[in-house]
Amino acid sequence: MNDMTATPPLRGFAPIAAADARVLVLGSMPSAASLAAQQYYAHPRNAFWPLMGELFDAGPGLPYAERAARLRAAGVAVWDVLAACRRDGSLDAAIDPASMQINDFPAFFAAHPGITRVFFNGGTAEAVFRRWVLRRLDPLALPALVRLPSTSPAHAGRSLAAKLAAWRALAVAAAGG
């Protein structure tokens, strides 16, 4: 890997979240396409918005602001584990571990006390959260943690239908189930 210490860190986005959110979807860090568009999951081959279209009528055919509003209305929050990092390209494997800056989850969960489940969009988000965030949270107030298959185009080993079957758990939890 190249020496990235001279490169300014990439900065993530504010969460998509209403105060009454019931579930949280966590990625690791926005991709290069997402950073360029200033939108979560902006890569055209990422399955996130097609899945949200199936689950919450928040599909990629809608303007981004409308998609975000529909997720908030459904009780779904979206964020990333990392606030900032250095990375060549978009792959999670290219994140420089020494550069990782974790988002403020104690403050986020305090502001969103109705969140009962955290859904990880892939393994990196889960691994970083478990390693760097769990120890900062009150174990008695911790929401349930669930890993879902990544929606990234780099993880094409599962069909969209198979991903949808797994991601239906998000809709059930958002509905209070």
Image (cartoon, rainbow, N blue to C red):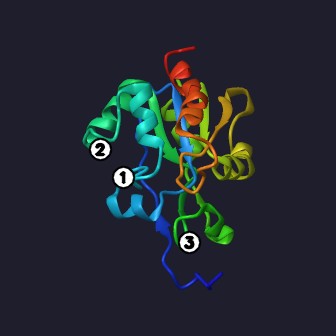
Disc 2 and disc 3 in contact, CB within 8 angstroms: no
Which residue corresponds to the image point at 53% horizontal and 15% vertical from the top-left? Answer: 176
- How far apart are the two marked residues, 1 and 3, measured between alpha carbons? 19 Å
Amino acid type, residue under disc 1 in the picture:
Gln
Q: Quadrant of the N terminus?
A: bottom right
- How far apart are the two marked residues, 2 and 3, measured between alpha carbons? 26 Å
Any mark on residue 128, and which?
A: none
SS assignment at label 1: loop
Q: Residues within 10 Å of mark 3 (few under 14, many from 20)?
A: many
Which residue corresponds to the image point at 60% horizontal and 52% vertical from the top-left? Answer: 155
Instruction: From this view, report whether residue 160 is shown above or below residue 124.
Output: above
Rendering quarter of residue 138: top right
Disc 2 and disc 1 in contact, CB within 8 angstroms: yes
Amino acid type, residue under disc 3 in the picture:
Arg
* Of labels 2 and 3, the one closer to you: 2
Instruction: From this view, report whether residue 167 is shown above or below residue 40.
Output: above
Which residue corresponds to the image point at 58% horizontal and 28% vertical from the top-left? Answer: 165
The picture places residue 98, in percent across and down from the top left corner, at 67, 71
Visible in this render: residue 152? yes
Any mark on residue 39, and which?
A: 1
Lateral position of residue 19 relative to residue 145, left or right:
left
Q: Residues within 10 Å of mark 1 (few under 14, many from 20)?
A: some
Q: Residues within 10 Å of mark 2 (few under 14, many from 20)?
A: some
Label 2 sits on residue: 64
SS assignment at label 3: loop
Any mark on residue 86, and which?
A: 3
